Image (cartoon, rainbow, N blue to C red):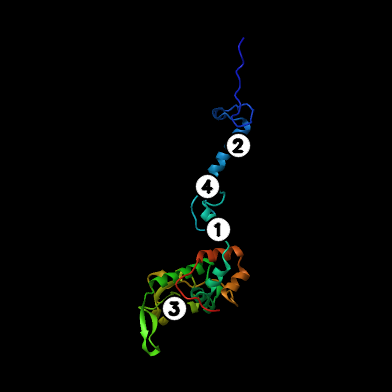
């Protein structure tokens, strides 16, 4: 009399179901339910390996983390971090922010002179870069009881290739860092004919979008909280220049 072969049971703890009739399932000693769960997890990890981190500016993949949205705790904290009110206050009082606000106010297209909020961050980064180039030396003013002053070796400024007063764009592509004297001489002049189109600048083709109050007030009125948060996160903490009083 031949004995019937004893069918193996699932190796999962407290599971007494027989091993699923599948070559791979038998290899792993799993029942149908636990084998399906295993395959779903494998497919989920495969799909996750093709997903990028959701934090703006991060291009890493999240396949090596348990988080479903971010590649690391650092990215998760940075993406979920609410911009501190004091940081916003310091930024909108900063000379860089005020200068860009003045550019927009003097432009006939006003808010139409920018294509997106990223242009504001790019212009501020240009001011930060200018500050690195703007080297100064110490001078003593004898007429004012030897007051120490910092004077630049060469005064630099942000210059619009296509004049701001004539509707030039307030973007990084229409702006460069140049000596202040050159900027003053050609501030209201159209660029001369040039074989290099990039040096001709860019005129805004957008309609005029009035900005009646301050730049920050406009952002609060017409932009979402997510857009404002992304802008100030991109700008970050500004250093090296005195804040202007309100």
Which label's residue is closer to the chain start, 3 or 2?
2
Q: Which residue is mark 4?
A: 65
Label 1 element class? helix
Q: Are marks 3 and 2 in contact (CB under 8 Å)?
A: no
Q: Which mark is residue 190?
A: 3
Q: Which mark is residue 222?
A: none
Vertical arrangement, residue 84 with respect to residue 102, above or below? above
Label 4 element class? loop
Q: CA distance from mark 1 to mark 4?
A: 16 Å
Q: Which mark is residue 79?
A: 1
Q: Which residue is mark 2?
A: 37
Q: Are marks 2 and 1 in contact (CB under 8 Å)?
A: no
Label 2 element class? helix
Label 3 element class? loop
Q: CA distance from mark 3 to mark 2?
A: 68 Å
For the C terminus, give its image quadrant.
Answer: bottom right
139 and 222: which is toward the camera: 139
Question: Is residue 232 at all visible to an observer of this figure?
Answer: yes
Disc 3 crowd rating (10 Å Cα; few below 14, some 14-19, many 20+) is: some
Q: CA distance from mark 4 to mark 2?
A: 20 Å
Disc 4 crowd rating (10 Å Cα; few below 14, some 14-19, many 20+) is: some
Q: Position of residue 1 (x, y in %)?
A: 62, 9
118 and 73: which is toward the camera: 73
Which label's residue is closer to the chain start, 4 or 3?
4
Of marks 3 and 1, the one in the foreground: 1
Q: CA distance from mark 2 to mark 1?
A: 32 Å
118 and 4: which is toward the camera: 4
Which label's residue is closer to the chain start, 3 or 1?
1
Q: Position of residue 221 (x, y in %)?
A: 63, 71
């Amino acid at each position: 009399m031949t004995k019937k072969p004893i069918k193996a049971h699932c190796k999962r703890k407290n599971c007494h179901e027989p091993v699923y009739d599948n070559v791979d399932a038998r290899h792993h000693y799993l029942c149908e339910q636990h084998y399906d769960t295993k395959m779903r997890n494998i497919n989920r990890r495969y799909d996750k390996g093709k997903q990028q981190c959701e934090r703006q500016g991060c291009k890493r993949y999240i396949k090596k983390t348990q988080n479903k949205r971010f590649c690391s705790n650092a990215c998760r904290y940075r993406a979920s971090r609410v911009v501190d009110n004091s940081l916003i206050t310091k930024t909108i009082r900063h000379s860089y922010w005020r200068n860009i606000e003045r550019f927009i106010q003097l432009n006939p297209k006003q808010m139409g002179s920018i294509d997106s909020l990223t242009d504001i961050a790019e212009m501020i980064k240009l001011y930060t870069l200018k500050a690195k180039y703007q080297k100064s030396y110490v001078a003593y003013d004898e007429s004012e009881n030897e007051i120490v002053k910092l004077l630049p070796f060469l005064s630099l400024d942000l210059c619009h290739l296509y004049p701001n007063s004539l509707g030039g764009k307030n973007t990084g592509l229409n702006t460069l860092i140049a000596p202040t004297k050159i900027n003053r001489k050609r501030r209201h002049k159209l660029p001369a004919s040039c074989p290099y189109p990039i040096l001709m600048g860019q005129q805004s083709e957008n309609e005029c979008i009035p900005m009646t109050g301050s730049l920050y007030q406009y952002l609060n009125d017409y932009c979402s909280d997510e857009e404002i948060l992304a802008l100030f996160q991109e700008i970050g903490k500004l250093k090296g220049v005195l804040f202007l009083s309100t």
